[in-house]
Amino acid sequence: MENYTIILIIMALMIGASGIAGKIKLPIPVMLLMVGILAGFVPTMPEIMINPEIIMLIFLPPLLYDAAFNISFKEFRTNINTISTLAIGLVFLTSAGIAIVAYYVIPGMTWPLAFVLGAILSATDAVAAIGITKGLGLPHNAITILEGESLVNDASALVAYRFALAAVSGVAFVFWNASIDFLMILGGGFLTGFIIAQILSVTLRFFRADDMVIIGLMFLMPFITYLVAEHFKVSGVIAVVILGLGMSRLSRERFPDKIKDQSKHFWDIIIYLLNGFIFVLIGLEFPVLLKKMPPSKVWHFVGYGLVITLITLLIRLVRVYLQQVNLQKAFQGKRRISKEALFDTKTSFIITWSGMRGIVSLAIALGLPVKLDNGKPFPMREEIIFITIVVVLISLLGQGLTLPWIVKKLGKQS
């Protein structure tokens, strides 16, 4: 009964904070984070530890599916060069950059542990990017790039994390084997999502006269798709994204307006509740982890988190600007780059500043094994988790609070 009470309290906090944020013109995710942190310090509030498996199964599939369903496939394809650069290349570049800094800055950090931390914090978060940038009037291609990147980069980060975790356990890293595994995991996820999308398309046509069955199946399938993909040890993230893209196309071409409207209202409520719940949970997690850290280490590790946040922003800034220049050169060289795929310097900065860490990073960190295969405790586990939550909070609060102002200032200069 206590668990149900906590859920109801979180829901009440979420709904109330969302309403207040709308009144005072503050980004809703930022408001929810602050409310969660404050609530976590209340003495009577029970400790809430996020179960990473619940995050990955209950929250991630519907949020990814909804984002993929609502993104324009045509615009996604137009910006595929930039999206793939940020969602794959930048993820591994960021992971390496964080690892180098962590190894040389944090005492006791080995190379394998540094790469584990780098992999955990390498990807931007789909929920954060979409939640905070919504309604800011960003350039259209910037929204497509941010959403497209966030749909794919979780898969890259999870693959990097698997390899880094194996290195901590003493498994030798072989580049060619890792590259083949990466392609197999992503390709397998693509194939799984495509096959399930085809099966669902046939099933939906069979039940086309029953609105509730159609909406029910579309709600259920992201979870099933994710589970099937993970069962076969391929990317559940990519599988759900491909399913969402496939269903989006089917909806536009075949669904009557009545089902489209019903489905949209249903998903709007689900995503509103899940988004809000996640940000309150992140806030509530900070006081729990703070209590587990020795007081003498807290400010040191807050400092490490700040340094890592700045490094991730710097790496992202350089890579996004290089991508802007490369696209311009490719377009002028009459390669296969459309004019719509180009973006200016202001858009580059907005894309950079919108790259926030969020719930997936925290879920991966909390999923670190307590013990290694040899029975020894996982080294620096609590320190890695604490640094992760610090980076997530600095990222969401710092960038989230300043992003509306930045967008407004850049807009005035246009």
Image (cartoon, helix red, strand yellow):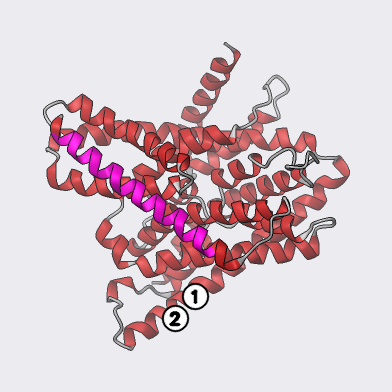
- Magenta segment: does it hold 186? yes
Q: Residues within 10 Å of mark 2 (few under 14, many from 20)?
A: some
Instruction: Give, as a three-letter code, the residue at label 1.
Output: Tyr
Q: What segment carries the magenta color?
A: 179-205
Q: Would you say 317 lies left or right of 77 here?
A: right
Instruction: Give, as a three-letter code, the residue at label 2.
Output: Val
**Residue 285 picture location, percent across and down:** 65, 35
Tell me whether circle 1 and circle 2 mark residues in contact (CB < 8 Å). yes
Residue furthest to the top: 1
Q: Secondary structure at mark 2?
A: helix
Res. 325 mark: 2
Q: How many marks?
A: 2
Give me the residue at 43% from left, 76% from top.
Answer: 324
Q: CA distance from mark 1 to mark 2?
A: 6 Å
Closer to us: 349 or 309: 309
Closer to us: 9 or 52: 52
Q: Which residue is mark 1?
A: 321
Question: What main secondary structure does the magenta stretch of the protein show?
Answer: helix
**Residue 281 picture location, percent across and down:** 58, 33
